[in-house]
Image (spheres, rainbow, N blue to C red):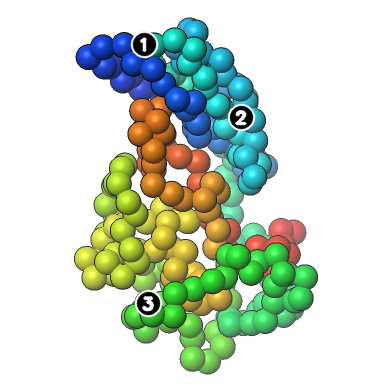
Amino acid sequence: MKIGIHFHARYEYEEPASFSPHLVRLFPRNSHNVRVERTAFATDGGADIQYRHDLFDNEVARCFYPQKESRLDFDLELDLELIEKNPFHFLLDSHALRLPFDYLPHEAAVLAPFLGSNPSLALPPELAPPSTPLPTVEAIVNLNHWIFENLGYERRDEGEAMPPAETLAAGRGALPPGSRASRSFCRAGRMPCCIRPPKKALSSAERSSGVSRANAARSCSLCSLNLIRSR
């Protein structure tokens, strides 16, 4: 399936303003299932746009504005080819067939930053680590099903992320892959979960650039590093 996406954001100011560098994270990653056929990005004419990759290999555009402007525009056009993906098309390594399991030493060394959990977070039994080992796929499906049935989605473009405990208490929250709540739920079950790029409060410059939590490029990885191998 081929689709076209057009994103446009305009910010207007009462008087010409100077701008610090803006970091734009609106570009999807190429993969076997998502192929970027065309990208056309533009901002104000006098801007110096530098395309780079961050620490997690996401493409970002760093924009420098040499002069004051009373209006700031961001425009992105994308042509994508999407290929249907079977989320269950994988094989588990033998040591990862049942959850919880122990990672191999070389896996544990790399995954350590993404496994830290909050021991004070009180989780409902359905999200707590299984008391007896469960088939890994069954445990992950159960976790996702509980979240879908019990937590409503709430869009939050700005402001601090809601702590996981508040998300549970309210029964709703912004729950994209890699959110604070999603990470806490996965890590509690010893499933590594990371976010690309690391989530933080948005600066005024980032908000001005149209890079909201809803638009920032993110991804979440569960049981990565050869624990799940594609055929």
**Mark 2 or 3, closer to the camera:** 3
Q: Which residue is mark 1?
A: 69
Which badge, 2 or 1, is on the more N-terminal residue?
Answer: 2
Of the 4 image quadrants, the one containing the C terminus is bottom right
The answer to which of marks 2 and 3 sits earlier in the sequence is 2
Image position of 19 (left or right of 220): left
Secondary-structure class at tag 2: strand
Q: In this orientation, does residue 75 appear?
A: yes
> x and y percent of residue 123 in the render?
36, 79
Q: Position of residue 48 (x, y in %)?
A: 56, 15
Mark 3 surroundings within 10 Å by alpha-carbon count, few (fewer than 14), some (14 through 19), many (20 or more): few
Alpha carbon distance from label 2 to label 1:
32 Å
- Figure check: 18 above or below 112: above
- Residue identifier under label 3: 121
Q: CA distance from mark 2 to mark 3?
A: 40 Å
Dot in front, 2 or 1: 1
Q: Which residue is mark 2?
A: 36
**Residue 82's spot in the image, x, y percent?**
57, 37
Q: Is disc 1 surrounded by few (<14), some (14 to 19) or many (20+) residues within 10 Å?
A: some
